[in-house]
Amino acid sequence: MSNILEVDGLRKVYAKSQFVLKDIDFSIPYGSIVGFIGENGAGKTTTMGAILGTLKKDRGAITIFGKKVDVTKPKIREDIGVVFDDMNFSSHLNVDQLAKVMKNIYQQWDNDKYNHYIQLFSLPKKQKIAGFSRGMSMKLSIAVALSHGAKLLILDEATAGLDPVARDDILEVFIDFVKDKDHAIFLSSHITSDIEKIADELIFIKNGEIILKVNKDELLHNYAIVQCRSDTFHEINEDDVLAYITKDEMLNVLVSNKHGLPRGCQISDFTIDDITLLLMKGENNERTHS
Amino acid sequence: MKGLILNNLYTVEKGIKSSIGLTILAISLLLFTQNPVALRVAAFLPFLLIPVNAFEVLKHDDKSGWSKFELTLPVERHKIIQSKYITFVLLFSMSLVLTFVLFYFVHTFLYPTFTNTFFNFLLRGMGGILAIAALHYPLTYLLGTEKSDTITISSMGFCFGMFFIVFMLLELVIGTVDGFDGIFSVTFFAVSIVLFIVSYFVSYMIYKNKEF
């Protein structure tokens, strides 16, 4: 068994909205950090909600730790740590009271570990959560997610609201979490630099559809953003074109194989942010690369 | 389950403490007046002040995001609903104990308070808040906490409605016999308990399909 999470043909339709999550498939291998990238409203939170059971799926199968997820059997959630982008806990509790609550919910709750993270993140123990900044609340949610023996972390914008130093500390914690190859993280973030720093695999989602699934190393070594004229663009192997955008008379093209490009294509330096922009704003090739 | 209840109680801890303080003060003042009307009010007032904190839990859960987060915990959905109802029952029991303690104190040192009137109004107070809760919970799960004012008014209307329906039906069935007040109070309380139990199942039916 090489995947900690498998999503197969997941579909979710909202009665009062046009949005549809369109039969998406992906998997998360053990020992990996998978970054989930997309604009607001692309379907990231819906996907995570359907996996976690906060939303009801219309179709598809979700397999976690090799077992099909059954929402009526919540024991599996002992091994899943969750952080949502908004507040997670009652604002009237303090850090110590929250520990007492969690101790009576999670069988594997580890108070020492929790106190370790509370100290690491410099959180006050007696202050009500109501007085916490957004960054402090996110740190608290991460501390809880890491303190009950979870094997899989599902983090929806978990680094949002954190200052660069705190983000860096937390990213180190995440890298450490998957080190033993028995854990994995599924992470969505608007801060693509965070994903670039720690993710092994990347999944791009647009309008409820997965448009690209790729290994980060492969992306950095084989993919490229190239600039070319229209006539040169047509010489690029169609299968290698993932997305393109026209700027003046030139085209910016995301290609999956930078080694077989025709003459006249100029390769530019790129970040995952640049790729995200091109995939989200550009014309997408019909073929989904995976 | 214990963790969920603990979370509910911590969430409204401040409100509970304030309402206990207010209850002690109000009942003491009412009982010291030795006025028969004041004694009646004192018998059911704790049930209007303390258990209502349990309704506030739902509002706080929505506002804080806990209502979504608790669905990711390793607990079944019916346990989440149970925890809300048990929190209400705990606060209800606390009100009952507090009422008895205060009335016992006055009964022992000042004047007799454990009269038929006390028991009648105690039962009506308990029945009233149970009837309010019986509609408040399912309506909140159905309409959402943003409609809390409508829900509160509807629940109180439901409580008064049940009160008069039970009264009229009982009068129709047994007539105005000796001890009617006592029979009515017990009947209203019993009907409210049944409504409260039915309400739990209705809330669960609504909640099991709820999405966050």
Image (cartoon, rainbow, N blue to C red):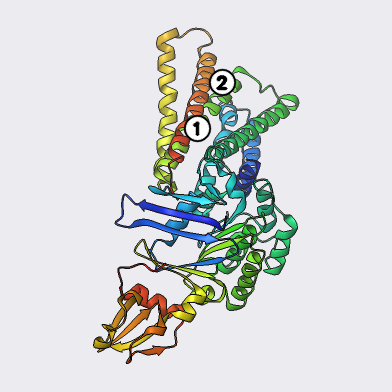
| Left or right: A105 in relation to B126 | right
**Residue that mark 2 sits on:** B120
| Left or right: B189 in relation to B140 | right
Identify which residue is drawn at 49% across, 21% down: B191
Identify which residue is drawn at 40% across, 53% down: A10
In the rendered structure, the residue with mark 2 lies on which chain? B
Identify the disc placed on residue B200.
Answer: 1
Q: Look at the picture and state if B187 lies above or below A232.
A: above
Name the quarter where the N terminus of chain B is drawn.
Answer: top right
Q: Position of residue A252 (x, y in %)?
A: 33, 84
Crowding at mark 1 (Cα within 10 Å: few <14, some 14-19, many 20+): many
Identify which residue is drawn at 31% across, 51% down: A16
Q: Quadrant of residue A245?
A: bottom left
Identify which residue is drawn at 43% across, 53% down: A8
Label 2 is placed on what type of residue?
Asn
Crowding at mark 2 (Cα within 10 Å: few <14, some 14-19, many 20+): many
Asked whether B75 or B187 is in front, the reply is B75
In the rendered structure, the residue with mark 1 lies on which chain? B
Q: Look at the picture and state if A219 lies above or below A31.
A: below
Whether residue B172 is visible: yes
Q: Position of residue A147 (x, y in %)?
A: 67, 57
CA separation in Å, label 2 and label 1: 26 Å
Q: Position of residue B192 (x, y in %)?
A: 50, 25
Q: Quadrant of residue A246?
A: bottom left
Label 1 is placed on what type of residue?
Tyr
Labels in figure, total: 2
